[in-house]
């Protein structure tokens, strides 16, 4: 069973990948409308499948290292009786890829079996996607092969003299060597330079040339990859300082002190596991932060696009509409203007301060209270295009006007707002709140509330899908923590027996193991937080989103607490196994 632990994450990832293919097939068979949004959803799913497979490969690499380290005496004996490094490495690679192939086939088989239960929910049963299933199996096989190569070659370099050693812990070195230090520092420095470069270019360039957004996103992605590479490279050397920093509260208890020592006693292992957890956490936190920021911008944009429940066009009778039961009836006039002789747009004389959803608007510069004759309100996007801010003078159809305010998101019913005294035309419509059925006959009416609700629901659905998929990625990382803890318990059987012999109870030993597992999650969560928030900000800048970064502090705190609970939970079964071992039997075990 122990030899299958490294590929458990591959099994889950293969199940996830094949389930995505089946879900797409089910959706296409069950939904009457194959909208472009369905394509967008499964494109998003595909992106997260890729992330999940990468996380699974990293978890497998870490677990292969532990399994091979535990077999160091066996491998040293094989070297002593004549096995060459190459032959030993090939044997380990074949062993790893074989169990990886079995895991990928099992994952695909479980997904296909689960798909046959879908008709119970009233949906069409999926077909048998043979080609995608084979692609998933082949991809999982390749990932497993790549994951086992480095651990196999490292284990094959064992000296025959290792057969004479009895150390229980094979992974206690924290040094990483000068070449690795140089590589890690270069990667971290390159990531930092790119981060500053993207921030400067993104903030300084208001009018972006074609392709600049894609270029900034590419540089952001490269910077993030370099930062994560630096974390993996320098991790063993950084894990001890990080542990010392966050473990101050734990050192007040014996169990906490032992847990910190247990995690810090194998820094390479701890660095590998926490790096995978940090990747998942950084993606979740970046997504939550980005979604929260975009939600604020989206509310402002929706307030600008759909400022009331109804838009009534044509000559309007305010008294008749009010008598019909509608509220907040605001008639408006519309005109076409040219600003500074180069930008033509539509403008209205709508009074923003009388809108019900005024709180959803976010003023960038100036104040809506400053609106008056010969003044104009512009959206931030339009103002940036013109190179103006609140207080700037602009030419509007040959008349000098002052920019009273600029607002994020957009301006209702056009691109600019004018004072009623500056608009010389008859009312062309009105905004109102209430049910469309209350509008008297003879009016053309459009339900803005329905459009707004549809947009809000679509955004919420996309965010929920993204967060759900990222938590599935985190599940793979938690499985890695559970596998690592289980193998660590096997490796430290004699240590557990000694702790029991000197007075530690079974319950206390179980708490020790679960605390160690929880520490993996906390360390990874804090590192992920340190990476996720800056790169969320960088992604917002790269996309050209004109909205301040909004970190959802409560949601981030919940993620950290849930992750700590999940990783601690992943240590429950290993903790029970450790607690069942007799002190006498443990002290007689030979590692």
Image (cartoon, rainbow, N blue to C red):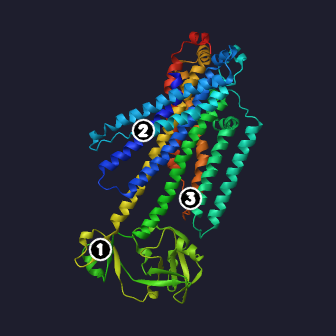
Query: Residue 384 location in percent, x, y?
Result: 57, 73
The image quadrant of residue 163 is top right
Q: Is residue 97 left or right of residue 335?
A: right
The image quadrant of residue 269 is top right
Q: CA distance from mark 2 to mark 3?
A: 36 Å
Residue depicted at x 24% and y 69%: 437
Q: Which SS class for mark 3? A: helix
> Above or below — where is 205 with respect to 537?
below
Q: Is residue 439 left or right of residue 359?
A: left
Q: Give the labeled residue for mark 3.
A: 540
Residue closest to the eye, 144 or 537: 144
First-in-chain label (2 vs 3):
2
The image quadrant of residue 152 is top right
- How many residues crowd around disc 3 within 10 Å: few (fewer than 14), some, or many (20 or more)? many
Q: Give the labeled residue for mark 1.
A: 445
First-in-chain label (2 vs 1):
2
Image quadrant where one finds the C terminus: top right
Q: Which SS class for mark 2? A: helix
> Above or below — where is 194 with respect to 390?
above
Residue closest to the eye, 316 or 480: 480
> Above or below — where is 179 with respect to 63?
below
Res 133 label: 2
Query: Residue 483 location in percent, x, y?
Result: 53, 28
Label 2 with label 3: CB-CB less than 8 Å:
no
- How many residues crowd around disc 2 within 10 Å: few (fewer than 14), some, or many (20 or more)? many
Query: Residue 569 location in percent, x, y?
Result: 49, 31
Q: CA distance from mark 2 to mark 1?
A: 51 Å
- How many residues crowd around disc 1 within 10 Å: few (fewer than 14), some, or many (20 or more)? some
Residue closest to the eye, 347 or 91: 91
Residue closest to the eye, 330 or 571: 571
Q: CA distance from mark 3 to mark 1?
A: 37 Å
Q: Which SS class for mark 1? A: strand
């Amino acid at each position: 069973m122990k030899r299958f632990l490294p590929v458990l994450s591959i099994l889950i990832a293969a199940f996830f990948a094949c389930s995505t293919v089946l879900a797409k097939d089910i959706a296409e068979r069950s939904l009457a409308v194959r909208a472009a949004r369905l394509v967008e959803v499964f494109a998003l799913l595909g992106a997260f499948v890729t992330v999940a497979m990468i996380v699974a490969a990293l978890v497998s690499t870490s677990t292969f290292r532990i399994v091979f380290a535990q077999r160091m005496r066996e491998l040293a004996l094989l070297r002593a009786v004549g096995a060459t490094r190459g032959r030993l490495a090939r044997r380990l690679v074949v062993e790893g890829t074989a169990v990886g192939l079995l895991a990928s086939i099992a994952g695909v088989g479980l997904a296909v079996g689960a798909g046959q239960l879908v008709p119970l929910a009233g949906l069409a049963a999926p077909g048998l996607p043979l080609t995608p299933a084979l692609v998933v199996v082949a991809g999982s096989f390749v990932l497993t092969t790549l994951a086992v190569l480095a651990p196999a070659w490292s284990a094959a370099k064992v000296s025959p003299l290792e057969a004479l050693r009895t150390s229980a812990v094979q992974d206690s070195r924290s040094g990483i060597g000068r070449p690795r230090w140089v590589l890690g520092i270069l990667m971290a420095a390159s990531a930092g330079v790119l981060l500053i470069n993207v921030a400067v270019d993104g903030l300084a360039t208001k009018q972006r040339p074609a392709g600049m957004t894609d270029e900034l996103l590419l540089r952001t992605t490269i910077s993030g990859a370099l930062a994560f590479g630096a974390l993996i490279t320098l991790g063993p050397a950084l894990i001890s300082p990080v542990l010392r920093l966050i473990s101050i509260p734990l050192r007040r208890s014996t169990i906490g002190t032992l847990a910190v020592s247990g995690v810090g006693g194998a820094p390479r292992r701890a660095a590998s596991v926490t790096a995978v957890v940090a990747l998942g956490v950084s993606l979740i936190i970046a997504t939550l932060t980005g979604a929260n920021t975009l939600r604020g911008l989206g509310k402002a944009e929706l307030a600008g696009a759909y400022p009331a429940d109804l838009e009534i066009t044509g000559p309007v009778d305010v008294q008749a509409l009010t008598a019909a039961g509608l509220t907040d009836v605001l008639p408006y006039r519309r005109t076409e203007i040219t600003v500074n002789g180069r930008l033509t747009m539509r403008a209205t004389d709508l009074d923003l301060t009388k809108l019900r959803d005024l709180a959803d608007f976010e003023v960038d510069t100036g104040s809506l209270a400053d609106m008056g004759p010969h003044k104009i309100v512009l959206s931030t996007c339009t103002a940036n295009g013109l190179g103006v801010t609140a207080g700037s003078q602009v030419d509007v159809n040959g008349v000098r006007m002052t920019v009273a305010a600029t607002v994020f998101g957009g301006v209702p019913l056009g691109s600019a707002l004018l004072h009623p005294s500056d608009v010389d035309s008859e009312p062309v419509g009105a905004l109102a709140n209430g049910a469309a059925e209350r509008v008297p006959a003879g009016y053309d009416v459009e339900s803005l509330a329905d459009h707004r609700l549809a947009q809000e629901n679509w955004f919420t659905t996309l965010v929920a899908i993204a967060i759900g998929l990222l938590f599935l990625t985190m599940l793979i990382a938690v499985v890695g923590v559970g596998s690592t803890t289980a193998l660590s318990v096997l490796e430290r059987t004699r240590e557990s027996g000694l702790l029991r012999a000197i007075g530690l109870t079974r319950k206390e030993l179980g708490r020790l193991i679960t605390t160690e597992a929880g520490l993996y999650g906390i360390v990874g969560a804090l590192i992920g937080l340190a990476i996720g928030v800056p790169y969320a900000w960088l992604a917002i800048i790269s996309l050209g989103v004109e909205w301040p970064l909004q970190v959802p502090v409560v949601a981030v705190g919940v993620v950290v607490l849930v992750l700590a609970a999940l990783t601690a939970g992943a240590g429950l079964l290993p903790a029970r196994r450790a607690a069942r071992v007799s002190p006498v039997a443990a002290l007689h075990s030979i590692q």
